[in-house]
Image: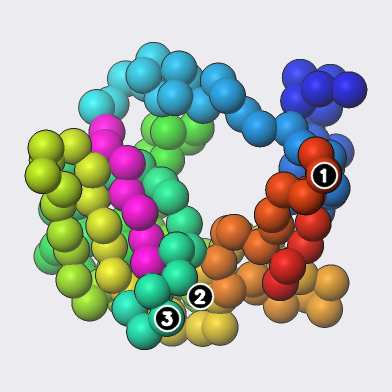
Amino acid sequence: MNRKDYKGEASSKVLEDGNDLLIDFEKLKKVAQSPDSVVPVVVQDAASKEVLIVAYANEKALRHTLESGLATFWSTSRNELWIKGKTSGDELYIVDVFVNCEQNSLLYLVTMKAKGSCHTKDTKGQTRFGCYYRRIKNGKLEFIK
């Protein structure tokens, strides 16, 4: 099976909690077709330096981030402002915002209001610390956190 074989809620379950390697190599093509111009944003925990999330920001999201002090992105799938944690309570407070040498990506250093930043939950129902909780091992995904 490949990624296109999964639809709806089953797709999320398989992608987020499964061991099958189903990389979305079409993601940047979809982002490029978005009506809004965006740049990638790497979100890193200020204390541990662990990468938590990779998301996208447009000018509106960056402005909101700088003005509010909350990590804010542009949802490329919903085409709307996404204030991380607004509904879950897992807000990310901005410590610093960096721009790369070519000014085509951002780095948000953050602290967490809660114990996690990922929208998925672990087997105990707790928000995962970050979105990178699996690694590739022998062609399959292996949970590390």
Relative to 45, residue 38 above or below: above
The residue singled out by tag 1 in the image is: 138
Disc number placed over residue 89 in the picture, else none: 2
What kind of residue is marked 3?
Ser
Specify the segment rendered in magenta. Answer: 38-44
Left or right? Give the position of 14 relative to 104.
Answer: right
Comes first in the chain, label 2 or label 1: 2
- Place of residue 44 in the rendered image (x, y in percent of width and height, measured from the top left): 37, 67
Q: Secondary structure at mark 3?
A: loop
Disc number placed over residue 48 in the picture, else none: 3
What kind of residue is marked 2?
Gly
- Residue 80: image quadrant is top left
Which of the two marks, 2 or 1, is nearer to us in this view?
Answer: 1
Q: Nearer the viewer, residue 126 or 53?
A: 53
Task: Decide whether residue 41 is among the magenta residues.
Answer: yes
Q: How is the image coloured?
A: rainbow
Comes first in the chain, label 3 or label 2: 3
At label 1, counting other C-alpha atoms closer than 10 Å, the crowd grade (few under 14, some 14-19, many 20 or more) is few
**Rendered residue at 27%/63% (across/down):** 108
Left or right? Give the position of 87 relative to 94.
Answer: right
Q: Secondary structure at mark 2?
A: loop
- Place of residue 112 in the rendered image (x, y in percent of width and height, measured from the top left): 42, 80
